[in-house]
Image (cartoon, rainbow, N blue to C red):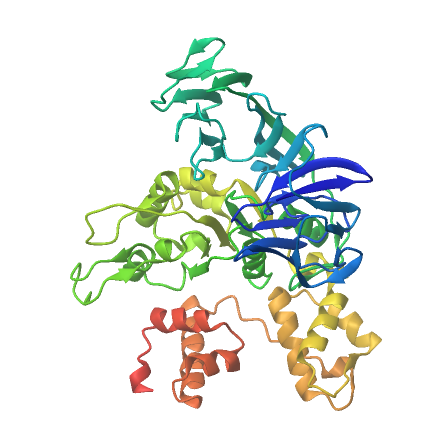
Amino acid sequence: MEIMFSRDGRPCLCQKLTEQTVTIGRDPCNHIQLTDEEISRRHCVIEKKEQTYIIKDLSTNGTFLNNEMVSESAIEVGDTISIGRWVLNVVEKADSSNGETVVSHKDPTSIIDFDVGQKIISTQKFLLTITPSGEKPYITTTAKLDLVFGTMPSCDIPVEDSFVSRRHCRLWFENNEIFLMDLNSTNGTYINGKKAEKNAAPLESSFKIGKTVVCYKFEKEKEQLKPSKKNSLGPMVGNSLAMRETFALIEKVASSDVTILITGESGTGKDLVAQLLHEMSCRSNKQLVSVNCGALPASIIESQLFGHERGSFTGATERMVGLFEQANGGTLFLDEIGEMPFELQTRLLRVLETKKIRRLGGKNDIDVDFRLVAATNKELQPMVNSNRFRQDLFYRLYVVPIELKPLRERSDDVKLLCEKFLQEMTPKGKHVELSKETMRKLKEHTWPGNVRELKNVIQRSIVLANSNIIEADEISFAPLESEKTSEYSLEIKEKNAIVDALRANKGNQSKAARDLGIARTTISSKILRYRIDIDEI
């Protein structure tokens, strides 16, 4: 059974249904990407259950089967599925006279650079036209720049040709060159009429495997980033140009595996950006593993990241799987990367280059595959200049920087943020709003604590309000710490606050975190950092 995709009455592509699930939507992560605005990011999915194919709607605008909206239904030959302007006809076998088949490969572009000043994104991809003997050509694009061709389903580009070996050849891009290598196939790989072993190849050419001709083209493109028309993305809101550019950049890079460095002052929402990047990525079905590099002592962070074997050091009574392994297949978020010990930066760089780790006390390397997102509230370039941060690691991280502007530079967002926090934190059945004078006062404040400080101010005002309208004199800001206040005294205050919250909740970390308004993972890392003994509380 096959699905023939048509748009405005014109057949465009064909998808053969197999045992595999097929996702359809606007996002590049889908097996079939349809870019129309009325198509949802993940619009619908077709999967096989026993001997029947099922279509499930995942969209906002609906999926229609034979002109009736469905949430889930079996499909059979002769059915017509409508999504937006697209019509999907379920057929036994598609008519081969309908022109080229265009298939959208998962993650069709690879982002290699973002020019912060010019707002220009650079991308690269392979465009492949594959023509089996006696059949019509089909086109596929892929951001993966190391491809294996063969008849095995696990190959990057599976080819149905009885004269092609299971793993026939490899095509890859390295150091600005294309290479083609035969993988000891039975019938050989030929380029320009000559048998290939390991050959440097042009950026655009063709080669033959079995009776199949593969034309390839390596493409680099530049795209001007345009501000989003939205004023929200996930849990983040903002009307300002800075935030709308941030939303557009997140949406553009989320589906790529490119490394992201999120910069911005404390309280600007770097963790929310990391969460969005993971949820909107092709890795969203795996874990988002977060670690605050500044919250763990240098003696602990290495073991936390790499894991350890039993007996590798005093106290290692059990094998522990590290965060690198836990993030396998998913996303690793390294918050406050600027706090990572210098000697550990070398090991991190090696992991990023080799995609391998070795547990402390281990003898064997372990393959890992994760997308790295890092964040910092520090200027890393001056740290590089003073030899406190590795230059090579800095360049490895600084591929696509996402800068979150401080709230004082985007006062246009204050009103929208206030409305969001009022809606979220006002008790059910109660209506609270801000007076015009209150809003003016909030917009004029410099917000050294950024969005986090604004949220705390609104929460405090809701609790202390004398009526359903919060007046300006009911708004109070936390006093700024004296410049002479040492970092040590601030840490003592933080530790005492955590201990008090734990005592009030009889050692329950989840409840204590809720009282403090921080994440459960944050309080756990703080307990480790300040060596708080839960048993003594």
Residue found 39% across the figure and 89% down from its top: 506
Quadrant for the N terminus, please.
Answer: top right
Q: Residue 36, position in %: x, y? A: 75, 45
Splitting the image into 4 quarters, where does residue 432 fall? bottom right
Nearer to us in this view, 399 or 96: 96
Which residue is pictured at 76% across the width and 72% down the height? 441
Count of numbered labels shown in the rendering: 0
Could you tell me residue 31's position as x and y percent?
59, 45
Q: Nearer the viewer, residue 325 or 100?
A: 100
**Quarter holding residue 61:** bottom right
Q: Is 139 left or right of 61, judged from the image as shown?
A: left
Q: Quadrant of residue 239?
A: bottom right
Can residue 443 be seen in the rendering of this structure?
A: no
Horizontal and vertical percent position of residue 205: 55, 16
Residue 40: x %, y % from top left = 71, 53
Q: Is residue 337 above or below residue 461?
A: above
User: Which residue does the image show at 60% across and 45% down from the upper left?
Assistant: 253
Give the residue displayed 72% in from the left and 83% down from the top: 474
Q: Quadrant of the C terminus?
A: bottom left
Q: Is residue 26 visible?
A: yes
* Above or below, comparing residue 517 to residue 333 in the picture: below
Q: Is residue 429 left or right of residue 304?
A: right
Horizontal relation, residue 150 to residue 46: left or right: left
- Comparing 455 with 372, the one in front is 372
